[in-house]
Amino acid sequence: MPGISFTIPSHAEAVRWACLAVRGVLEGVRLADGDKYSVELAVSEAVTNSLLHAYGGRPGHAIGLDVIVEAGQLVIAVSDTGAALDPARIETAALPAEDLLRENTGGRGLFLIRQAMDLVTVERIDGRNVLTMTKGHGGVK
């Protein structure tokens, strides 16, 4: 299946690079503009989480990005070798009512990823954290 795979550095600017690459892939997929924006937001949040949480904001590490267009679905995997994410956090990611009113915009990444994507899983494979996000689409252009 068509797709791209690349590695970006654990640097804040690299989040934008990841989003631009995904935006390019999304141009060839039949998906509503709002859904495309949501997928790009999910990628931004996932890469930011790798940078901030897995690597503690430290540069000099690698974040992998795999984007695969399959029949009827888009599969995006973000991977790193940093601190592991507890898989239970994916299932319990939610916004408490008081979070809806707070000004600090941090701490909502997993919730936003789950809202944007159809399926989100996390696993530890050969020393790598792999966050896999899946979104259905209407085919390729």
Image (tube, helix red, strand yellow):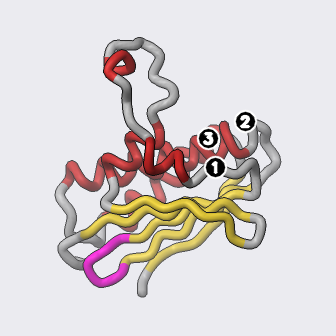
Q: Position of residue 55 (x, y in %)?
A: 75, 43
Q: Position of residue 19 (x, y in %)?
A: 46, 51
What's the residue at 51%, 74% (across, down)?
Answer: 4
Q: Which mark is residue 114?
A: none
Q: Is residue 71 magenta?
A: yes
The Cα–Cα distance between marks 2 and 1, rounded to whole angstroms, is 15 Å
Q: Earlier in the sequence, mark 1 or mark 3?
A: 3
From the viewer's perspective, is residue 91 above or below residue 57?
below
- Kind of residue sitting beneath label 3: Glu
Magenta-tinted stretch: 70-74
- Locate the N terminus by quadrant: bottom left
Q: Earlier in the sequence, mark 2 or mark 1?
A: 2
Give the side of residue 110 with respect to residue 134, left or right.
right
The foreground one among 97 and 9 is: 97
Q: Is residue 139 magenta?
A: no
Principal secondary structure, stretch drawn in magenta: strand
Give the side of residue 107 with respect to residue 123, left or right.
left
Which residue is disc 2 drawn over?
57
Give the side of residue 5 with respect to residue 111, left or right.
right
Q: Position of residue 49 (x, y in %)?
A: 59, 42
Give the side of residue 32 with respect to residue 29, left or right.
left
Looking at the rendered image, the disc whose residue lies closer to the viewer, 1 or 3, is 1
- How crowded pointer 2 is (Cα within 10 Å; few <14, some 14-19, many 20+) is rated as some
Which residue is disc 1 drawn over?
85
- Kind of residue sitting beneath label 2: Gly
Which residue is disc 3 drawn over?
13
- Kind of residue sitting beneath label 1: Leu
